[in-house]
Image (tube, helix red, strand yellow):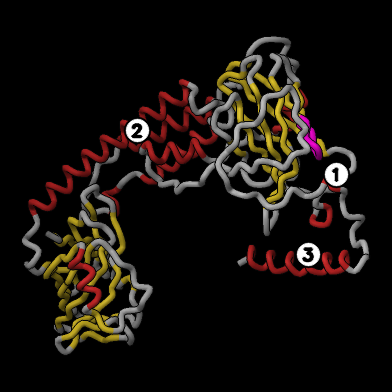
Amino acid sequence: MLRLVLRSFVNVVYALWLMLVILGGCCFGATPAVEGQDAGPVVAVAPVEPAPAPVVVSDAPIDFVPEPAPGILEPRLSRETWDVLARGPVPQVRDALSWFESAPPHESGALEGALVICRTMMTPGHDDWDGIFGGPEIQLRVRIAGGAMRATPEGRPAGVFSFPVARLAPRDRVWMRLIDEDVLDDDVIGEGSTQFAGITPFVVSMRRATLECRAVSAPEPRAALARFDRMLSRAEDVRPDVSLHDLGYPEREAMEVLAAASEAAAWLDWSDARLRDRIDHAERFERAWSDAAHAEMDRATSTLPDPATPVELGEGRQARVLALRCGVDAGRAHREIAALPAWAARVPCVAIVEVVAGRGGWTLPAVPGVLDPELRVVDGDGRSHALLWVGRRTAGAWRAPDEVVQVAEGERVELTLDVPVRDARLIHARHDRGGVSLLRVR
């Protein structure tokens, strides 16, 4: 909501400014010369390798390079999660300016396991960039020796950036781009590259800015690595329990492990053995958890009654699974429901469930959604997913929810529930007053 308000405000201000400029007035100073004009919004095209040169200050149009594609960071320790974290923004060290100012010169040779800190200096005539909005919020994008492009987190007004390097050798090319992050669009301040000569400080020059970069030997982030080890050890002590959400996966500990790794990655490259060995350990834990979760699911399903057998849900309520319809049959089940909203999801499966209302009856909401108490489906990996109520059988026909329905005590009602996974194994039903019941789905 705040972002929408800011966008609306900026649109109004920009429109007024543009109108005054067109009418011949100069609202906030003369329009910039062609040499220093705004590079415009960042256009997403394939990355283009910068041309080799000791220092490049190009007058040609900038080849737009998108930032690394964001991913969804799950609170899991799988390889996919680590890949998302490594492709994400480069974590920044605290007190980067102090590290920059205290960094000694590097006399010659490659930088090994170093932390590079760069400070932005806007060139005269361009130091009022984005002045009407309080100055630029800058993001740095870096590519070293043709490697993957890396980006710092979202705008940093101070313009001081840090990034760890496993190795920066003489003659390696360092390419950088500065981005001014705005509410509406991101603008390119400039880009340039330099060939590392084996000494620091080194400078990357652009039309509108210059970056001076220094380096320090990265101290070992002992506290972060110790927290990684401690939280991973706690996660390894947890065992899957089918009565718990996601079988009790140690989500809090996993998030702490990821946070500790991110903190360490401000100082160490992701390829550093001290970090890489720990990530390998975390991935082994994730595989072991998956194996144990499958075993727990097999054990639970083998001891539960047939899906058609009613199961007590507490307070006199009962439920049983009448059918699980997947694929084409799931689509047919949706089409059988009258007045189902067009936005209703097309899901891999639907479950037809019969519920007998318990003491005090049961209230069904007037719109599709989660029931109270909530029913969740557990897949073969032990992951829990919400079940959404989308239809009720009434007078022999299926109808989508369109009014509040009071189900009397002892009354039976058949419901259609959307199942968002194909490998549905159990329905996890929480009781009104605590406790959990499990229903076999197949």
Q: Secondary structure at mark 1?
A: loop
- Residue at the top extreme, as displayed: 108
* Location of residue 364 by image quarter: bottom left
Report which residue position mark 1 lands on.
126
Q: Quadrant of the N terminus?
A: bottom right
- Numbered mark located on residue 218 in the image: none
Task: Judge the density around disc 2: few (<14), some (14-19), many (≥20) Cα neighbours within 10 Å.
Answer: some
**2 or 1: mark nearer the eye:** 1
Q: Residue 80: image x %, image y %?
A: 39, 40
Q: Nearer the viewer, residue 170 or 244?
A: 170
- Numbered mark located on residue 14 in the image: 3
For the residues labelled 2 and 1, say whether their Cβ atoms are less than 8 Å apart: no
- Tell me the distance, in whole angstroms, between the alpha carbons under discs 3 and 1: 19 Å
The residues colored magenta run 205-211
Sequence-first tag of 2 and 1: 1
Q: Nearer the viewer, residue 87 or 215?
A: 87
Q: Looking at the picture, which amino acid does disc 3 mark?
A: Tyr
Name the residue at 21% across, 62% down: 327
- Residue 197 in the magenta stretch? The answer is no
